[in-house]
Amino acid sequence: MDRSNPENVYRRTRKRPTMSERARRRNEPEQEQEPVPLPEPLALPAPNPEGDMEVEPEAAQLDDQETYPFPGGPRITHVPF
């Protein structure tokens, strides 16, 4: 090792923390942090008093797409790939 280089001298003379110093740092109580306020809970939509039994037109179109290639045909439950 070249002692003329100041970086090498620093590396050799630098005091490393001892085991007791490491344990002391590990056991120090952590600084208390301010509690982070929780976001407001999202409001749920009001329940429909008439019920949700009506079929929307979009849902009917999706039903036809699920029974492709023939409307009213067998329902596709598995795509083989």
Image (spheres, rainbow, N blue to C red):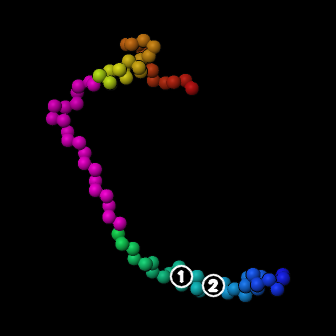
Q: Nearer the viewer, residue 55 or 7?
A: 7
Q: Residue at x 45, y 23 (%)?
A: 77
In which quadrant of the rendered image does the C terminus lie? top right
Question: Counting other residues with Cα less than 10 Å from the Cα at mark 2, is it few (<14), some (14-19), or many (20 or more)?
Answer: few
> How many numbered marks does the figure carry?
2
Report x, y in % for residue 79: 51, 24
- Compared across the picture, whether 73 is left or right of 48 comes to right
- What range of the chain is rendered magenta? 36-56
Q: CA distance from mark 2 to mark 1?
A: 10 Å
Residue reaching furthest front?
5
- Front residue of 9/16: it is 9
- Mark 1 belongs to which amino acid? Arg
Name the residue carrying label 2.
17
Instruction: Name which residue type carries label 2.
Output: Pro
Assess whether residue 17 is covered by the magenta stretch: no
Can residue 12 be seen at all in this image of the molecule?
no
Task: Point out the image quarter for the N terminus.
Answer: bottom right
Residue occupying image coordinates x 32% and y 64%: 37
Image quadrant in which you'd find residue 48: top left
Q: Earlier in the sequence, mark 2 or mark 1?
A: 2
Front residue of 53/8: it is 8
The x and y percentages for residue 40 are 28, 56
Pointer 1 local density, CA inside 10 Å: few below 14, some 14–19, many at least 20? few
- Is the residue under label 1 in contact with that under label 2 (CB below 8 Å)? yes
Quick check: is 37 in the magenta stretch?
Answer: yes
Q: Is residue 41 above or below residue 4?
A: above
Residue 67 percent coordinates (x, y)? 41, 17
Q: Is residue 52 above or below residue 14?
A: above
Q: Is residue 34 above or below residue 7?
A: above
Residue at mark 1: 25
**Residue farthest toward the right in the current orientation of the protein:** 2
